[in-house]
Structures are given as C-alpha cells and as structure tokens.
Image: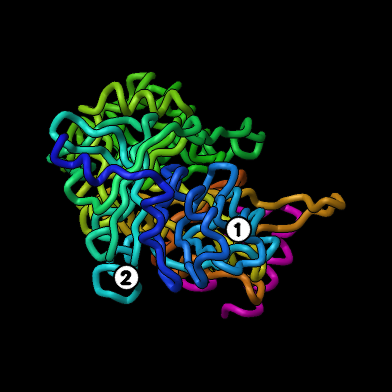
Amino acid sequence: MNDYQAKFVTPEQAVKAVQSGDWVDYGFGAGFPELLDKALAARKGEVKDVKVRGGLVIRPRIEVVEADPEQESFSYYSWHVGDYERKLQKNGLVKFMPVMLRSLPYLYRDKHIRCDVAFVPVSKPDENGYCGLGISNYAWRTIFESARTVIFEINEHYPKLQGVDGSHRVHLSEADYIVEGEHEPLPVRSYRAPSETDIAIAKIVVNEIPDGAVLSLGVGGVPYTVAKMLAESDKKDLGCHTGTISDAFLELYQAGKLTNAHKELDTGLSAWNLAMGSQELYDWLDAEPQLFHPGDLDYIHSVERISKFSNVISINGGVQLDLMGQENAESTGTRQLSGVGGQMDFLEGAYRSKGGKGFICINSSRLTKDGERKSNILATIPGGSTISAPRTMIQYVATEYGIASLSGKTLRERAEAMASIAHPDFREELMKYARENFK
C-alpha cells in the first residue's frame, strides 16, 4: 500500500485534472462519485464546457447540475433517465443519449466517443491494493482504459466483493489519483406495494416459468411481484443472469429458490452488472461474495452468452405497445422517461435460449388525472414516442387479461392477439382497426 500513497490526494486536488472542454464519466446506477462530484461543482466559473456523462442516478442530487443550472461550466448527459434525472429534465438540465447497453463498450473502445477523465467509484482496497467496483461494474474497465486521467473514489460503504477471477476488481496502480473520505449512506431503491393489476399479471407470468429457469428481472413492480410469488411457490433451482440484481433476487435466495444449480455457465452463481435496492441487498453482496459473478456489460449483456443458458426468462415492463407488437418502453411523446437499458439485450437472449421466453408486462390501461381511461395497447405508437423494441423482437406480451404470443404470426394475427389482451373497453375498436388495416 505504501507504493501508492503518492496517488492519494484531496478531491479538490484531483478534480484539477478536469480541463475546459473535457468529457467526464460518472458511471451508471447506484454507484456514484459523491466526493469528486462535489469538488468539481466547486470549480464552477473556472472551467467551461465540461460535459458530465452518467445515467440511472437514484441518489437525491448531482452537484455539478445543482450548482450550475445556467450550464455556464457544466452540462449533464444521461444514457438512461433515472428518477432524479427525470426531475432535472423538466428544467432542461439533462441531455439524453439513446443506447443499447450491450453496445456501449464499443462506443468507447472504438473511439466513437471519448472519455477524458473517469471518476471511478470503488470499494476499500485489500492488503494487496485491489478494490472492488462496489455496486456498479458497468463498463468501467473499458471506459477508464480509454481515458486520459483515471481517478478512483474509495467509498467505505461499498460491498468489497471482487468477482470471479477478478471480474469486479481494479488495482490502485491503475489510477492516476485516488481520493477517500466520508460518504453518505448508499442510495436505496424501494418498491411500491403491487396493485391488483400487477398481481394479476404476475400470476399469469409465474405459470410460464419452469423449474431451473434463469431469470432476468427488470426493476419495476411486476418483476418484483413475480419474484415474491416465485418465492412462495413450489418452483425450485432458479438462476440469475440479469442486468440489475435487486431485492427480488434476495427474496428468492432467502426462500431457498435461487440456487443457480442448472445454469450451463456460472453454475451456482448469480451473475449481474449493477446492484440496486435496499441496504440489506448490499449487505448480502458483501457478506457472501462466493454466491455472485458480477461482470461488465460485455459479459452480462452479451446476447451470445445469454443464449447459452436454457430456459432464460426475461421480464420487463413497458409504456405502450401497438397492434403489430412494437413497444415503447421509455417515453411519453418526446419526453424521455427512462431508457431502453438492457431490455433489447435480454429479449434477444431469451429468444435464442432453448426454452427461453421474453415477456413485456404492461397494464392494459391507465387512468388519467381526470379519471379518463386510456388504453396502453394502441393501434399505432403515437408520433414522437420511442420505438424501444421492434415488432420482430417481441415474443410475449402479458396484461392482466392474458398473454399474447406473437412469434410466427402474421400482422393480422398479431393484431388480433394484442387486441384480445387489451382492456375490454377498447377491444372492439382495436379489432376494427385490425380488420381494416391488416388484410
């Protein structure tokens, strides 16, 4: 450790590496360079046109944005709009960049985009100078290997797991500067109580999940409800290969359902890229590192790797679908709500998996603030809204009224299947559109 003492500096000293015009990467998800962010924000007025890149931020603030709403020194870019970023977006303080997560490492590796300074959040080092990547592996190694300057921020609260064969670790020697200090408690994400509709959808989907299935669960209400039902079911030997590990998987483990026993790869291990949930989840990762294979986007989101598992079950939510099966998962008109994230990666992986199934789970309808019922299954996705997944990638759609299986169907058959799981108030109208437009 004495070999690296010269690299330890204050956050204020470290951020002097940022120059006007630089791109600075903050990372993704619940992992966040808290001390460096605050120190960089204090340089408002000293630098110009510094572009900060991150995504899916769930902590309550980003200091460079809060300190500079006029964007005189800093502008913020997001790969995936999180809850906090959504609030900033209303004030024009977030610039959204669409990306499929599996393609993101290529953008850095092949120099389509650049990172000048990487703010990498890491766990406390061990006696050999190795740190874990905490709760966000992301594509950090690819990013910082392309950067001009690499700054590690040691967070004393992070789980210290380093992954299978070092899949989740970095070494102090790889940093140009290292900062440490006192951090706030880790950001947590909780789930609202499931609605009656969530429960109805989850019951339908649970019946489609076999013993030994390898689960990829999104972070919404329906995926979490599915996990709770699986935990209370007679299903056994379930597996995990997922973009985000959450309390859904912790519940399965505590119920004795998550064994990973039948996975063709990473047998016995839960594989993930991000961790996001309760403090209990983070404590689990820290206490039992031998249960996990945290990996980077190249590993976890690889369609080829996902397809090597049997019975991959991918469960995600959506915003709207049309009668052809096109899905909008991330916007209301031109207003960005989230991002496509890894949904396409796991939909395609499940499609290729022997016995695999990819589900888009959606409430058939919603009520507006004025109490008017609107269908979430539409004749066409409205202009300006995103097509997150094309019709060719949607395998199964589940609402509280059943499951539409779309594979191998004509446009007319697809439309009829989609209309059959719409809210009854809209079925006849949708069927009429199908008859008139899909001959």
Left or right of residue 100, residue 133 in this image: left
**Coordinates of residue 203 in the picture (x, y in percent):** 52, 34
Left or right of residue 289, residue 329 in this image: right
Q: Residues within 10 Å of mark 2 (few under 14, many from 20)?
A: some
Of badges 1 and 2, the one in the foreground is: 2
Q: Which residue carries the number 1 mark?
A: 337
Q: Which residue carries the number 2 mark?
A: 107
Confirm whether the magenta stretch covers residue 413. yes
Residue at the limit of the structure toward the right, as seen here = 370
Residue pictured at 59% horizontal, 54% vertical: 85
Which is the main secondary structure of the residues drawn in magenta? helix
Tag 1–tag 2 contact (CB < 8 Å): no
**Coordinates of residue 399 in the picture (x, y in percent):** 58, 48
Foreground: 150 or 208?
150
Confirm whether the magenta stretch covers residue 305. no
Position of the C terminus, as image quadrant, is bottom right
Give above or below for 14 relative to 330: above
Residue type of the residue flagged with mark 1: Leu
**Coordinates of residue 69 in the picture (x, y in percent):** 66, 61
Report the span colored magenta. Answer: 410-439
Q: Residues within 10 Å of mark 1 (few under 14, many from 20)?
A: some
Residue 31 appearing in the image: yes
Residue pictured at 43% horizontal, 35% vertical: 246
Using the numbered discs, state the Cα–Cα distance from disc 1 to disc 2 in whole angstroms.
23 Å
**Coordinates of residue 100 in the picture (x, y in percent):** 39, 64
Residue 378 appearing in the image: no
Foreground: 196 or 76?
76
Residue pictured at 69% horizontal, 61% vertical: 90
The dot on residue 155 is none
Pick whichever of labels 1 and 2 is earlier in the sequence: 2
Position of the N terminus, as image quadrant, is top left
